[in-house]
Image: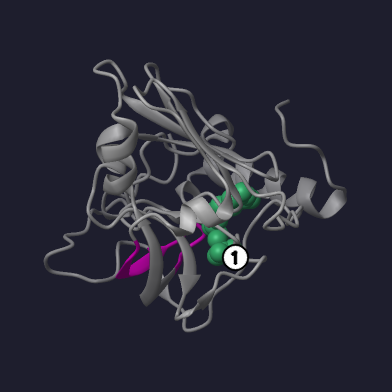
């Protein structure tokens, strides 16, 4: 399958091939659903204490000079922010759990950044906007519904556990959508594009679920 992510050698190609195979075979599926009111760990997940790094292997060096965050598409007011302008937006902290589709979960992550709802207030999505595509500096893309973005625990983050987000974890700025599998939380965030139609992203085009709710085990689809 072709898209805008450039091939980066055998390691990443192998990772992509393995994850496509998981999707075809429905690996890790337990066939049950979880209840976030009752359980903390979604079905088929296991708890880790460290924080694994998962990406396509490119890990771009996004310097403050290079950084831009564009918010555009089906909105009334587009934004194009330098890093200092992004940092000058109202900041908030949030604690949430991470659930990765490759089965690990990590509890109690302390994040700092700009709430998705702060961004929604500024840009004012047009009435027919329904979806969002995140674009990253490594060429990665992922999509979510506007209803999933418009949640109190969704943030554009730049700190984890009181420290600047490292390059490996997507610094300077990444998405955080804790109610969905972690592949939806784009690292090295470059652009938030509001769209009218649904546009599947990198993993969504390779057998992964359009929505990705861990409680419903929406791993593949
Ligand atoms: N830009 C970008 N964002 C990305 C990815 C990627 O390859 N590129 N991988 C996704 C996947 S599959 C996961 S599980 C999480 C991993 O984030 P972490 O490395 O901070 O744990 O990032 C997501 N965001
Ligand atoms: Mo992932």
* Residue 132 coordinates in the image, percent (x, y): 41, 31
Q: Nearer the viewer, residue 104 or 64?
A: 64
Is residue 147 part of the magenta span, yes or no? no
* Residue 13 coordinates in the image, percent (x, y): 78, 45
Q: Residue at x 29, y 20 (%)?
A: 126
- Give the residue number, with chain letter if any, for mark 1: 169
Query: Is residue 173 toward the left or the right of residue 108 in the image?
Result: right
Query: In which quadrant will I find the N terminus?
Result: top right
Is residue 97 part of the magenta span, yes or no? yes
**Is residue 27 something that shows in the picture?**
no
Q: Residue at x 46, y 79 (%)?
A: 48
Query: Is residue 123 toward the left or the right of residue 9 in the image?
Result: left
Q: Is residue 75 above or below residue 81?
A: above
* Residue 43 coordinates in the image, percent (x, y): 31, 61
**Is residue 12 something that shows in the picture?**
yes
Residue bounds of the magenta highlight: 91-104
């Amino acid at each position: 399958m072709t898209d805008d992510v450039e091939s980066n050698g055998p390691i990443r190609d192998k990772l992509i091939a393995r994850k496509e195979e998981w999707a075809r075979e429905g690996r890790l599926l337990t066939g049950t659903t979880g209840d976030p009111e009752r359980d903390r760990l979604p079905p088929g997940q296991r708890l880790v204490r460290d924080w694994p790094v998962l990406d396509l292997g490119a890990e771009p060096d996004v310097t403050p000079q290079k950084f831009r965050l564009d918010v555009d598409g089906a909105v009334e007011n587009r934004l194009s922010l330098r890093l200092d302008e992004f940092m000058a937006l109202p900041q908030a902290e949030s604690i949430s759990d991470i659930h990765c589709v490759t089965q690990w979960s990590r509890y109690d992550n302390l994040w700092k950044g700009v709430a998705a709802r702060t961004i929604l207030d500024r840009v004012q999505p047009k009435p027919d906007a329904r979806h969002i595509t995140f674009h990253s500096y490594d060429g990665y893309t992922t999509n979510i519904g506007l209803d999933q973005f418009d949640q109190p625990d969704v943030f554009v983050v730049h700190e984890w556990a009181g420290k600047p987000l490292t390059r490996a974890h997507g610094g300077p700025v990444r998405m955080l959508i804790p109610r969905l599998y972690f592949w939806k939380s784009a690292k090295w965030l470059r652009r938030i594009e509001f769209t009218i139609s649904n546009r599947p992203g990198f993993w969504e085009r390779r057998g992964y679920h359009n929505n990705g709710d861990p409680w419903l085990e929406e791993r593949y689809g």
